[in-house]
Image (cartoon, rainbow, N blue to C red):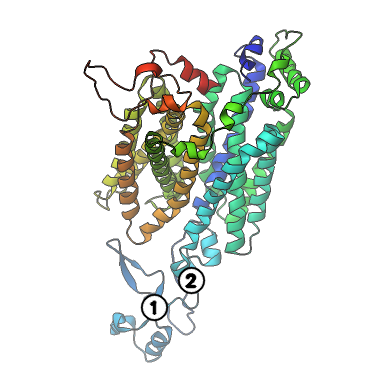
Amino acid sequence: MGNYDEDTAFLGQKGPFFALLFFLLNAIYISTGFHGLYIVFVGASPSHHCQVAAGNLSEEWARASIPKEMVNGKLQTSQCWRYSLETVRNLSAQGYSPQDVNLTDIKREKCVDGWSYSTDIYHSTIVSEWNLVCDSEWRVPFATSTLYMGYLLGSLVSGQLSDRFGRKKVLFTSLAAEALVILAQSFSHSWLIFCVLYFFVGTFQISLYLTAFVLGSEILSKSLRVLFTTLGAFLHYCIGYMVLPWIAFAVRDWRTLLRVLSGVTVVYVPLWWLIPESPRWLLAQGRVLESEAIVREAAKKNKVTAPEVIFSASEVKEDSSQNSQYSVFDVLRTSEIRKTTFMCLLLWMAINIGYFGLSLNTTNLSGDPFLNCFLSAVTEVPAYIVSTFLLKSCPRRPVLSAFLIIGGGFLLLVQLIPESLHTLALALEMAGKFGFTMSFTVVYIYTAELYPTVLRNLGIGMCSSAARIGSITAPYVIFLGTFNKYLPYILMGSLTIASSIANMFLPETFEKVLPETLEQMQKCKSFIRRDKHGLEEGKGSITMKEHTAGNKYMNE
């Protein structure tokens, strides 16, 4: 709706209507925070060792039946092997004690009788219930990745569904469906059922996130729209993320935890009667009277007088003929666009691997896993605030590269920290998470400014798909820590540093008008070269001192 903001300008920028919607939409994002990462606790692996059916074995022999192994330079009880129980029983029956024999000469065997799990931290997880350890350990990162596979599907279909059926219906359908699937997941009787349901949790969750984002962008006033899209949604997601470890601390059984998280969604039921449909979407569907009714209700709540005719007939349908002639192939049509697209895909993938990798790794760190998760969430709050203010006054390219170097650099330093200084190692990982979170914020804005209007949705859609691939990969990167605890940090840190270098080849977009056509995008240069007159190429027609047009797009 090209003139929608002008036609509804009489509503003002503030008022009870906008304030209430701002609060309610942000409240929805709290649920995405504690629904998005509960696998950190549900899929945690408690301390465990082979089950030893004591029988006539003494407690001393039962303890000695589990061999010791060197893991990451530390001697610890084996989690997947035990000494041959038959041999141990024979030695015990002959009157030998563990001190009388060389235990390392005894043949080893796998945990044929199952495992014994510690309940000091977790009473029950999917790992302890279905024995997802040793040869089945790969099933935990796979289960985690199914959520992000669902993200990929939800990202592809949610926009089409909300365009067809409306923002409000898709928003609340996704919210209800997510809660029901999580509830069903708590009754899973097998790992496979858990994974299938977790896939649909991801599908509905990303649909909820994106649809709420679109609805807020379309219905809020311009000033609140900027605050909502740049800070409100992210911060309220962080609130849910910070609440999650305390719920998990109070509820140590995974099935009960899922039922609690599902039940919390009930508080959102009254929002169906408080959040209206998007007037912009209704206009696009030709439902002018319904759109005007919402706007008039907003005027009543804001205590302003609405004009007799709000929308003219010419605004009933939006002309999308210009965008419809472009396809995904245009994003790869020329060498300049291909280079920009390739580097953007690398950035999104690297940032998502680092962000979700560190988020999923909190239970593997030294110290209290609940506190570690809380600290990981807390570091995101200043990151979002700092990055939002920097975006208003700083060039995108150096800012993003600096954040990437911060995120990757600190992770590469973790391997240099002695085992005794685990608090310092934790601080470095939290600093890395700070860098990745800031990068997450900047890359969204930067990518939107790089692509021309006719390809912006397609370009961001491709980058979002790359992000999903990165998040699907993240659990397996963390899984590498079972072979070497520093391997995930080296991999994530190196990939991030590489992406920061690639980022320097992208064109700068700060204080430049957003490109409208492919030709304008192609004028953006990766390098600054000077012609014989000493002028910088690549600025020309799309450079201006004010960022007016860019702000207008991002706001609208």
Left or right: residue 534 compared with residue 332: left
**Which of these two is toward me, 488 or 154?**
154
Q: What numbered label is drawn on residue 192? A: none
Labels 2 and 1: the sequence-earlier one = 1
Few, some or many C-alpha atoms within 10 Å of disc 2 (few <14, some 14-19, many ≥20)? some
Q: Nearer the viewer, residue 418 or 541?
A: 541
Judged from the image, the secondary structure of the residue bearing numbered disc 2 is strand
Residue 553: image x %, image y %?
A: 52, 21
Measured from the top left, where is residue 128 in percent x and y? 52, 64
The residue at 52%/57% (across/down) is 143
Which image quadrant for residue 346? top left
Instruction: Give residue 65's mark.
Output: 1
The kind of residue tagged 1 is Ser
Q: Which mark is residue 115?
A: 2
On the picture, is 289 further left or further right than 532?
right
Residue 61 percent across, percent down from the top left: 39, 80
* Neighbourhood count class around disc 1 (C-alpha, 10 Å): few under 14, some 14–19, many 20 upward: many
Task: Give the residue displayed 34% in from the left and 19% down from the top.
Answer: 539
Residue 218 in which image quadrant: top right
In the picture, which quadrant includes the C terminus? top right
**Residue type for callout 2:** Trp
